[in-house]
Amino acid sequence: LFVDIQISDWMPLPENPTLLARNMSYIKPLTASIGPKSTKCELRDETAHCDFEEYVSMLTTTRTPEVPSGGVFSVKTRTCIMWASNVSTRVIVTTQVEWTGRSFIKG
């Protein structure tokens, strides 16, 4: 299976040039027996905090505008990497759905 992934360069955020962001997109195959066979996924990665002595926090926003109600929600995933000891790290990943409009699937 060949997946064409488009990834932009990391660029400084206008509101805080010490933090970076990039955009990514790819086509995801869908396995449902009815409906489209694939859909476009759009991702935006942003550094929320970057201090390697303290912790690094990334926020990834994923959108799938071609699926039903795909234009009214996004999935936000936060990944936080911190030191657990002198020789190990701790990774915490949280996710939530953010609704920006009305949908029959929101309930």
Image: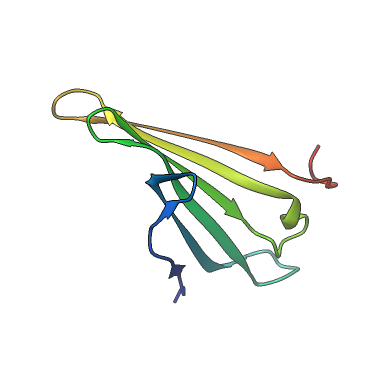
Q: Specify the quadrant that holds the N terminus.
A: bottom left
Q: Which residue is at the front of the view, 55 or 84? A: 55
Q: Residue at x 57, y 42 (%)?
A: 76
Q: Is residue 99 above or below residue 21?
A: above
19 with respect to 42 (left or right): left
Q: Residue at x 25, y 31 (%)?
A: 89
Q: Residue at x 31, y 31 (%)?
A: 55
Query: Which quadrant would residue 87 be assigned to in this image?
Result: top left
Spot occupied by residue 13 in the image (x, y as percentages of width and height): 45, 50
Query: Which quadrant would residue 86 be assigned to in this image?
Result: top left
97 with respect to 90 (left or right): right
Q: How many marks?
A: 0
- Residue at the limit of the structure toward the left, as seen here: 87
Q: Is residue 92 above or below residue 73?
A: above
55 with respect to 16 (left or right): left
- The figure's colour scheme reads rainbow
Q: Is residue 90 above or below residue 76?
A: above
Spot occupied by residue 53 in the image (x, y as percentages of width and height): 22, 30
Query: Which quadrant would residue 81 be assigned to in this image?
Result: top left
Q: Residue at x 67, y 40 (%)?
A: 98
The reply to whether residue 1 is visible in this rendering is no
Q: Specify the quadrant that holds the C terminus.
A: top right
Spot occupied by residue 12 in the image (x, y as percentages of width and height): 40, 53
